[in-house]
Amino acid sequence: MYRIGFSIERVSGEIVAPPSKSFMQRLVAGALLADGESLIMNPSLSDDGLSSLRIAEAMGADVSEHPDGVVIKGGSGFRTGRIECGESGLAIRLFSAIAALREEEVTITGSGTLTDRPMDMVENALRAFGAEVNSNKGYLPVVIRGPLTGGVATVDGSMSSQQISGLLFALPVLPVKSILRVDSPSSRPYIDITLDILKEFGVEVVNNNYVEFVIEGGQRFKPVVSSVEGDWSGAAFFLVMGAVGGSVTVRGLNPESVQGDRAILDALREAGAEVVWESNDAVRVARRDLVPFKFDISGTPDLAPPLILLASACRGKSVLYGTGRLKIKESDRGSNLRDNFGLFNVEIETFDDHIEITGGTAYRDFTGVVSSFSDHRMAMAMAGASLLTTTPVIVDNIACIDKSYPAFTKHFKMAGGTVFSGDGS
């Protein structure tokens, strides 16, 4: 088991935010559909980002290195009948819709935690627009045969917006107009990312308050030169660490980004941390007396791990609302965060739709190994938890952080921390 120990007494220094894998995967999808060559600068070379490049190649695109990033020449034919998505939930929902544009049968599969995540949302969304879809009793692998027929259909958006994004990429290239109606839309900021990137590729979608999308048919994706934004989701961990234990500056962030996780700054301000924009792409967060806060994460569920770390350092009871979807992430995040932070004497109660965290009490030094549950955001949260203890925190299966943030341990050291092998070597 690959284990890493993390130790940090005071946070200081400056890091650059990692590229957003959410932007990266959508740009790759658009480039796959485009006529010609697109250049993606500042690419995310996380596991999920690399998976999207491999998927694009398998679906007919040509991918090559470029001094400024990667070049993708759009393709139109499968090179294989089996598409491997790694552990990326977004990739499987995004590229399955694009795969359904074609008549050839293709099998979509994945690995690791993705094999335990339900695929009924993918099945139902693609069937609604005319594709033939079969799965392994609601789980991977998923076998798809298109083509999508377009038209008018309603899709459930209550648990994820990712299958909505997939359809928004696929439906514009059909010869007919489509109307995508969404029941209970969730994670609207991620739909905003999709709509912004579609606009970059010259594709127009009419958004009627996220419950209906009107998509004209016969649209063509134009090649782009685009740069991947800095990732607010990954940066959130270091911004919270600055608030809990010192001061940190994170560069490479867009203050006007449509990324929903930009809301981490609102939570930090509510908790009493100092938040200062030092330039148009650099924000500094410093510790002040922290107070309990209440925050709704229904549209930004990936903020749960760093916010629970923040709440653990606030004396009193903080509440996170809109937590119902945490069970279907890479792990059962609500329960696993409760159990892990409980090892440090942080009291956490989980309910169907909210989590209560009582922090700021006497922390317990835990000298065993903390489980990452093979969840990249869990692993990063537990590394940050070393701010609460006087002993290092050893986290198992730390390689899972490469899913979104392969430079995390390097940046942890740049922020004043110590990283060492936890395997006894």
Image (spheres, helix red, strand yellow):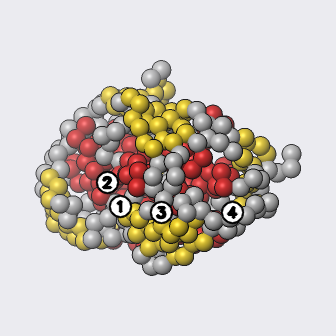
Disc 2 residue type (three-letter): Pro
SS class, disc 4 = loop
SS class, disc 1 = loop
Which marked residue is nearer to the observer: mark 3 or mark 2? 3
Q: Are marks 1 and 2 in contact (CB under 8 Å)?
A: yes
Q: CA distance from mark 1 to mark 3?
A: 21 Å
SS class, disc 3 = loop
When asked about the image quadrant of residue 33, the answer is top left
The residue that label 1 is drawn on is 299
Q: Which of 325/319 is in front? A: 319
Residue 101: percent from left, percent from top: 30, 54
The residue that label 2 is drawn on is 189
Characterize the local packing of mark 2: few (<14), some (14-19) or many (20 or more) Cα atoms within 10 angstroms: some
Quadrant in which the N terminus appears: bottom right
Q: Is residue 119 above or below residue 108?
A: below
Q: Residue furthest right?
A: 425
When asked about the image quadrant of residue 151, the answer is bottom left
Q: CA distance from mark 3 to mark 4?
A: 17 Å
Residue 104: percent from left, percent from top: 37, 56
Which marked residue is nearer to the observer: mark 1 or mark 4? 4
Which marked residue is nearer to the observer: mark 4 or mark 2? 4
Q: CA distance from mark 3 to mark 2?
A: 26 Å
The residue that label 4 is drawn on is 363
Characterize the local packing of mark 1: few (<14), some (14-19) or many (20 or more) Cα atoms within 10 angstroms: many
Q: Earlier in the sequence, mark 4 or mark 2?
A: 2
Quadrant in which the C terminus appears: top right
Q: Earlier in the sequence, mark 3 or mark 2?
A: 2
Q: Does residue 254 show up?
A: yes
The residue that label 3 is drawn on is 292
